[in-house]
Image (cartoon, rainbow, N blue to C red):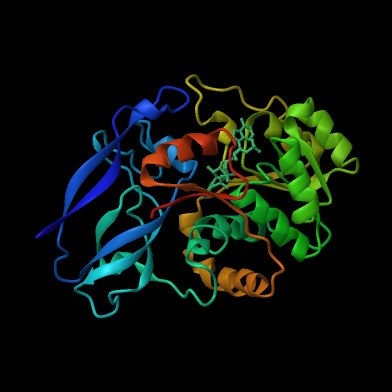
Amino acid sequence: MSHRSREIQLVARPQGEPRSSDFGLVEVDVPDPGPAEVLVRNRWISVDPYMRGRMNDVRSYVPPFNLDAPLDGGAVGEVVESHADAVPVGALVLHNLGWRELATVSADAVRVLNTEQAPEEAYLGVLGMPGLTAWVGLLTVAGLRNGDTVFVSGAAGAVGSLVGQIARLRGHRVIGSAGSPEKVAFLREQLGFDVAFDYHDGDVAALLRAAAPKGIDVYFDNVGGEHLEAALSALRPHGRVAMCGAISQYNATEPVPGPRNMTQVIGKRLTIRGFIVSDHGDQLGPFVSEVGGWLRDGRIHHHQTVVDGLENAPAAFIGLLQGQNTGKMLVRLA
Ligand code: NDP
């Protein structure tokens, strides 16, 4: 037997900004699960900036999406049929076959979720990949030290909002940039950032200088471009940059110019280090232990922007790249 399901396929590779015509909503038959497989009905799917890179036909650390095939990515769903004892019917699971209603998944490729610790969708955000990214970038990659002042760009997004809060909860001074006055107010009033600015309000270097007249020690880069150049100028000697993302460049159709002030890296003995969260699975335990504890105690704020309906997943993704989200952008199915 098989089951009717709907999925979002990539039907054209975006040129520059993705458009809704790059995506198609397609009805398909999903086969019954085989031995050691489960059938999952997705309840939440994640849209993430890295997916933009996978829409281009280029080699990267993850293979490109195929045309006329479903997209994939993080999802949380309920097991509705199971041929695996460890993953019973009714279990809520995290897996990687998002962008569709029903998925047949190997039981080895799902993680059964503890929904007493946190709501199920938190495993796509604060307790999931974005949370671990914030944790690893700040602690392992940037090597956060006592007394560091931290600057994070994309500060009102999924990763950035957690970077700022983790740093603050560990006693650091935190500065953030984001794309609207509402987001700036959110950073200051709800997340407890010491200083926040809207990067549209002028030259980023000047805005950062005003926000951090004594300089910064750590820059968590979600944005690249002008932000990275500004941060290199603001960093104090022995400062560190965790290069997490460069979202200002993801839709670029031509190579973009690099920061013009790279020689400052020498004189100030700066360290710039890129990272990919999937290399740091060993940090999941300590991360869940500390951030899960803050979550239980209500000390960490996890905000999300929810778009309803699989058919609106492309709009959610396009909106994410345009800054329509505060916190984690999620699509809720049914
Ligand atoms: P966000 O929730 O931060 O959403 C993306 C945000 O980027 C938007 O809300 C928008 O906010 C901002 N943005 C869009 N265009 C620009 C621009 N031109 N300049 C400045 N900001 C812009 O996404 P995530 O938290 O999921 O991801 C944040 C970054 O982390 C991304 O670069 C992503 O690729 C990276 N990442 C890297 C990982 C790794 O392993 N290295 C893992 C996960 C994420 P605004 O309104 O403020 O402009």
Q: Position of residue 298 (x, y in %)?
A: 69, 70
Can the viewer see residue 2?
yes
Q: Position of residue 237 (x, y in %)?
A: 81, 45
**Vertical placement of residue 14 versus 103, above or below:** above
User: Quadrant holding ligand 1?
Assistant: top right
Q: Nearer the viewer, residue 115 or 143?
A: 115
Q: Is residue 221 left or right of residue 10?
A: right
Q: Is residue 334 left or right of residue 175?
A: left
Residue found at x 72% / y 68%: 299
Residue furthest front in the image:
334
Residue furthest right in the image:
213
Q: Is residue 303 left or right of residue 76?
A: right
Q: Position of residue 178 (x, y in %)?
A: 70, 39
Residue found at x 68% / y 58%: 143
**Vertical placement of residue 331 versus 69, above or below:** below
Q: Position of residue 170 (x, y in %)?
A: 76, 65
**Vertical placement of residue 187 versus 87, above or below:** above
Q: Is residue 176 left or right of residue 45?
A: right
Residue found at x 61% / y 50%: 327
- Quadrant of the drawing holding the N terminus: bottom left
Can the viewer see residue 149?
no
Residue found at x 78% / y 45%: 185
Residue furthest top in the image:
254
- Quadrant of the drawing holding the C terminus: bottom left
**Vertical placement of residue 314 versus 172, above or below:** above
